[in-house]
Image (cartoon, rainbow, N blue to C red):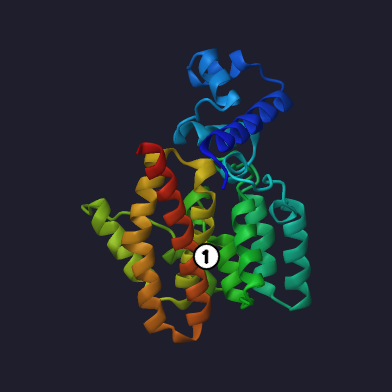
Amino acid sequence: MQSTNDYNKKVGQKISKLRKKKGWTQGKLADYFKVSPQAVSSWERGDSLPDVSNVLELSKIFDVTTDYILCNKSSSKYAFTDEKKMFTYIKGYTNSKGMLESQKALQYAREMHKHQNRKEGKPYIIHPLTMACDALAMGIDQDEIIATVLLHDVCEDCGVKASDLPVNDSVKKSVKLLTFSKDEGETSEEAKRRYYENILKSETATIVKLLDRCHNVSNMCKAFSKEKMIEYIDETRKYILPLQKKAKKKYPQWNNILFILKYHMVSVIDSVECVINHYES
């Protein structure tokens, strides 16, 4: 079994290697984190480990996963996160299957999100493209579901009305259900309760919302602070997992997919909680 000292040294070696590859000195990294150069030197020697919030920030700076820094995992440079490859794959798939709504949605989503980035710095379009690829990989290739996947954030993030989307009324309705809003006089809690209750009424909106959260929890370590991750995990347990449970009863034909999505989400949030608790203990 690997000793704590050996583990710390391996983590330190990775930090040192990534820092040098980026062309930063220990002093520059120390200035970035507002710590002493001796603290950075201690990380790289393996005498101590950066706290969890600093590990998250290191993953953003060096464009790798937290797994790469903390575990023996490869870095984040995978083909399935390549925007052009995903776009080309989805375009070819939807064309071959005659998925007309998805073809329109693909082009429109790319245009609407073209100047937007995710919190981790990647082009925003990668999010719906990844969700669509995930869905297709699981055998979800219903035209209106994939079109909704591709457009699910357009209204909320791009200021577009659902009625103006270049797709059929069914897709417009699903996207509108997935667009969060607060009515006058509503508390945030009341708005969220109404939002998720309405999503459950739609088979398409339910599947897309679960796909959305599945992808978001998978990437939150690169985008969120520790406090935001804790809040996001709490929201997932309070609203998303109950949505999945209710969907199993309401839409039993999706039980296999619903199991996969729940398994992945729970595995990720449990793992993240373990890491946070480990660093805080």
Q: Give the image location of residue 83, x and y in percent.
A: 72, 51
Instruction: Give 193 or 102, whichever is nearer the viewer.
Output: 193
Instruction: Give 197 or 70, whichever is nearer the viewer.
Output: 70
Quarter occupied by residue 236: bottom left
Three-letter residue code for mark 1:
Leu
Q: Which residue bears the numbered disc 1?
A: 211
* Figure check: 179 above or below 261: above
In the image, is 30 to the left or to the right of 270? right
Q: Give the image location of residue 18, x and y in percent.
A: 68, 30
Visible residue check, residue 173: no
In the image, is 273 to the left or to the right of 218? left
For disc 1, the neighbor class at 10 Å (few under 14, some 14 to 19, many from 20) is: many
Helix, strand or loop under label 1:
helix
* Figure check: 90 above or below 49: below
Please tell me which residue is depicted at 75% across the width and 71% down the height of the picture: 93
In the image, is 56 to the left or to the right of 17? left
